[in-house]
Amino acid sequence: ARFTEEQEGLVIKSWNIMKDDSANIGHRFFLKIFEVAPSARELFSFLRNSDVPLEKNPRLKAHAMSVFVMTCEAAAQLRNTGKVTVGDTTLKRLGATHFKKGVSDAHFEVAKYALLETIKYGVPASMWSPAMKNAWGEAYDHLVAAIKQEMRPAA
Ligand code: HEM
Ligand code: ISQ
């Protein structure tokens, strides 16, 4: 089924609230990922040899936010065109990076769970709904499918 205007609206509405609190949102997101999958920490070069506590790591926070921003953009693209059209070169780069680091299907699932949990606690309780969860989940799934298609060694 096509991604609807209503679904896009749910994503944008919640993102507009969360982005004012982006430092906390990013923080909660990666804590949740590492809580479910502690070994995922080893994948990140800027965490491996760092004594800085996780929450003080600026690259980790910035990267965490890019997952939200790109999922949000994917939602808008899905509604407009029916597919994820992140710039082709960006997608190729994302595919190559995640391939090289050994990011697995299981990692993408953990990150999906973490994303949805973070949104659930990042918006007012009265705003959260199964439809909102579904809209973010669908946008994320399409974005990940597009990244996975490019997951091969860099040319
Ligand atoms: C790097 C986005 C999912 C692990 C990156 C970068 C971006 C990004 C923008 C920076 C490098 C580049 O642009 O090529 C995303 C998005 C995701 C996603 C949009 C899902 C929709 C994941 C998952 C994992 C992961 C599930 C593993 C738990 C990494 C690692 C790097 C990376 C290890 C390299 C970090 C380094 O420099 O050492 N990702 N990511 N990503 N991502 Fe993701
Ligand atoms: C996914 N890809 C790159 C960086 C990230 C940082 C935090 C959480 C997930 C991420």
Image (cartoon, helix red, strand yellow):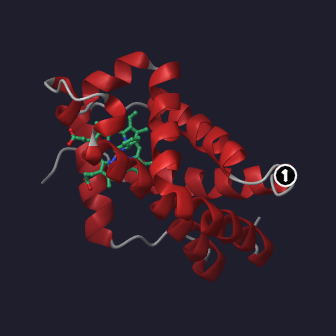
Residue, x 51% and y 40% (percent of image)?
A: 29
Residue, x 54% and y 63% (percent of image)?
A: 19
Left/right of residue 71 with respect to residue 14 in the rendered view? left
Name the quarter where the N terminus is drawn.
bottom right
Residue type at tag 1:
Ser
Picture layout, residue 50 above or below residue 6? above
Residue, x 22% and y 29% (percent of image)?
A: 52
Q: Where residue 86 sits in the image (x, y, percent)?
A: 41, 70
Q: Where residue 16 sits in the image (x, y, percent)?
A: 62, 69
Left/right of residue 72 with respect to residue 99 in the rendered view? right
Residue 43 in view here: yes
Picture layout, residue 49 above or below residue 153? above
Q: Residues within 10 Å of mark 1 (few under 14, many from 20)?
A: few
Circle 1 is placed at which residue position? 129
What is the number of callouts on the image? 1
Direction top: furthest residue? 39
Q: Where residue 60 sits in the image (x, y, percent)?
A: 31, 42
Picture layout, residue 78 above or below residue 143? below
The local secondary structure at tag 1 comes to: loop
Residue 2 in view here: no
